[in-house]
Amino acid sequence: MAAWLGWLIESNWTDPFLFAVYSIVKPLSGAAILVVMYGIITQGNFDSALFPYIYLGNAFYIYVGAVMTGVSWAVVDDREHYKTLKYMYIAPIYIPIYLLGRGVARFITGSIAVFITITAGVLFLKVPLKFAEVDWWLFIVTLTLGVVMLALLGLLLAGITLTVARHEGFIGEATAGALYIFSGAVFPLDVLPAWIRPVGYFMPTTYWLELLRRSLVGNVAQAFPTLANFSNMQILGILLGLSIFFGAVSIWVFKICDARARELGLIDRTTNY
Amino acid sequence: MSHSLAIETHDLGRIYKLRGSKKEKRKELVALQDVNLTVEQGELFGLLGPNGAGKTTLIKVLTTLLSPTSGWARVAGADVHAEPDSVRPKINMVSGGESSGYGLLTVRENLWMFSQFYGVPSKEANERIEALLTMVGMKDRMHTKSSDLSTGLRQKMNIVRGFLTDPEVLFLDEPTLGLDVGASRDVRKFIIEWLKADRERTLLLTTHYMVEADELCDRVAIINKGRVLACDTPTALKHRLQKDALFEIQTSPLNGLTPQMLVDQPEVTKAAIEETETGAKLSLGLVEESALARVINLFTQKDVKVMSLSKREPTLEDVFVDLVGRSMAEEESSETQ
């Protein structure tokens, strides 16, 4: 039900044609900026292993912003815009499940964006992805685990959103932006100063992106030293462990924030910011 | 607790900590103080008070949206703070004066979606939606996007949303706020019919319209500044004032005459003044009718002309004046100053 509502909200803000154009143009524009920058810096060396590393990392990173923001933005949307959050709260539903459901729509639009970006990369930019060589089992397990992990992180952000007024709409985007640097999305963690690398090692997104790359373009992805000494299963184990840890933390934080929001009377607050 | 109690509060309190500027200390706003109420199952209970009296805060606490800072409250047998998950399946709420809802969904879709959150089977939900929309005169708007509805129709849609799930306890917070006279009458009629259909349904209604409380409610609690000042049937509340003779007087501008000057007269038990375009409207309570002559004499001294004078039966407004010392309108304007 929440997913249905989320999809209607996500897809009905304009007419279908404009929505289709937007869904195609937006991810391609994002990828184009990166490709142009890469082309200038490397003087057009698109055959380097670095290119698929960056391109795929950037493509799948679309999920990070989309899923996390999709879940947390539902709080802002329902509380400030539709003024329905209080009615959802008093309904006999489990609010975290409702919020996760609302995030499904952004997962779907994010998936379309990822698909378009990767397809364009394969067709026009020689990203070395061969369907016959893809480790589909690893890809599907990793993608699923990662999306669940991102949705739970979105729940954490939703909890924080419940308790803050100013700039609440930017929490998801801001967090996704911050994680972009520390997740090895566009450059290996080894590029970062040594003292800051542990942040990246603690982020499940780091292992998630690494495994996605390995499952799609295995040998190229392993050309970088950061996690080269770890096998796929080891990385999957780390990803699973960190996902469970962050998932538990997210649920705990949401519960605390939910109780705090009830204490402060914030469930139905409209700030008009 | 008796099983026939739909709502019970004990010394219920709610204090808000208000954030000022960085240099200022945090201020405290007492929204509810020592509220003790019981509402029987099947009752239509009214909370009557001016804006800012604490009515909405009380509804928020009772509907599990807000935690109390002291005391406790039980709704449908469960503690609203400790057991919100037990309370929620049994309640619903409608807030008046707001245009909530998903504008991109049709009226039917909006209502159907909420019915699904309450586990109403889809077929039954559709039947209920059609029946309720017919009752409020909105059947022809069932497939209209709610963004295309007028404010009044959107409010009616929300009222239907509250009734749709057939709650044990329904909270209506100023349900007719912002509605025109005809729509308000329709809503009041609908409320009465809904309660008649099942004697186990309980409805708590907040309003600052005296007539609405008088017309609808089995019992009324008069609330001001977070405190319940009186709680009884409208008839019993008004009966308290029967010993006084009540007069309504339209006058020219008062030339400095204040309610206090009137109350200072030995035979005047209460006085409320409402400024009008042409002068003022006074509500006076007198120990006996013969005292009226002395009041008129006071008007003459102040060069105030009496435009009309009528004796009338007491209303809940008079009860409020009796309890608070001034009219609800005066109380609201003093709160905003």
Image (spheres, coloured by chain):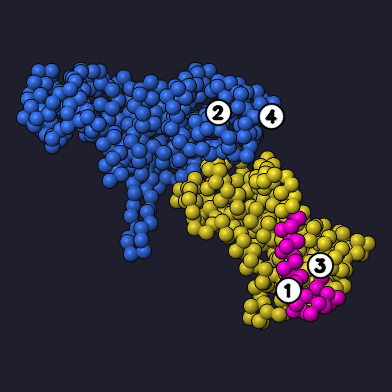
Amino acid type indicated by mark 4: Ser
Residue type at mark 2? Val
Q: Distance of mark 4 from mark 2, alpha carbons? A: 16 Å
* Tag count: 4
- Give the residue pinned by disc 1: A37
The residue beneath circle 3 is: A213
Q: Could you say where residue A206 lies in the image, as x and y percent from the top left? A: 72, 69
* Residue B122 image label: 4
Side of A99 relative to B28 (left or right): right
Which residue of the protein is positioned furthest toward the right in this rendering?
A: A132
Q: Residue at x 34, y 34 (%)?
A: B49
Q: Which residues are magenta?
A: A23-52
Callout 4 and callout 2 share a chain: yes
Q: Which chain is yellow?
A: A
Relative vertical location of residue A29 with respect to residue B190 in this rendering, above or below? below
Which numbered circle lies on residue B160?
Answer: 2
Disc 1 vs disc 3: which is toward the camera? 1
